[in-house]
Amino acid sequence: MDKNQGPPSVKQLGPLEQRLLQDMWGRGNATVRELLQDGDYKIAYTTVMTTLDRLFKKSLLDRVPEGRAFRYTPRYTQGRLRGRRSSSCSTRVRRLPCRFPTW
């Protein structure tokens, strides 16, 4: 991810990243253990921990230490992140060169 472009769009995320981010938006905040206890995840603790860490490094989550773990919180609302995708698409469309004949 280019640090000057802001966060990636939701479509650039993998399926597990999307699912965890969606769950974080619904909860507001959570630790890895809370996600595994309350959610419908049948995967290893370390898989969720690594995926949340990647979302943090992609600037999509904030985290604060809580004991020996981290409590994660979404950095952006769902609407703001999806709105960013729309505006970046329209910016790219405006930059396309005109390929129609200019009579």
Image: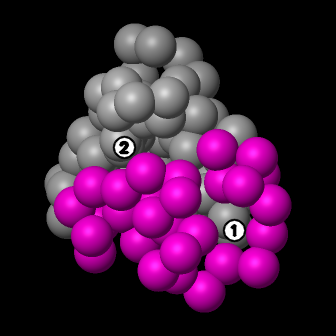
Q: Is residue 70 above or below residue 74?
A: above
Q: Say what amino acid the circle numbered 2 marks.
A: Tyr
Q: Is residue 59 above or below residue 84?
A: above
Is residue 20 something that shows in the picture?
yes
At numbered mark 1, what does the secondary structure look like: helix, strand or loop? Answer: helix
Front one among 6 and 99: 6
Question: Badge 2, how many Cα within 10 Å: few under 14, some, many 20+?
Answer: many
Q: Is residue 46 left or right of residue 85?
A: right
Q: Where residue 17 appears, x then y in whole percent? A: 61, 57
Q: Where residue 29 appears, x then y in whole percent? A: 28, 55
The magenta stretch spans residue 39: yes
Q: Which mark is residue 15?
A: 1
Which residue: 62% across, 35% down? 54
Q: Are marks 2 and 1 in contact (CB under 8 Å)?
A: no
What residue span does the magenta drawing correspond to?
Answer: 21-49
At numbered mark 2, what does the secondary structure look like: helix, strand or loop? Answer: strand
Q: Say what amino acid the circle numbered 1 marks.
A: Pro
Is residue 86 something that shows in the picture?
no
Q: Where residue 101 appears, x then y in whole percent? A: 54, 49
**For the stretch drawn in magenta, what is the main secondary structure?**
helix
Front one among 25 and 80: 25
Q: Is residue 89 left or right of residue 57?
A: left
**Residue at numbered disc 2:** 72
Q: Where residue 21 appears, x then y in whole percent? A: 45, 60
Which one is closest to the eye, mark 2 or mark 1?
Answer: 2
Which residue: 45% across, 64% down? 34
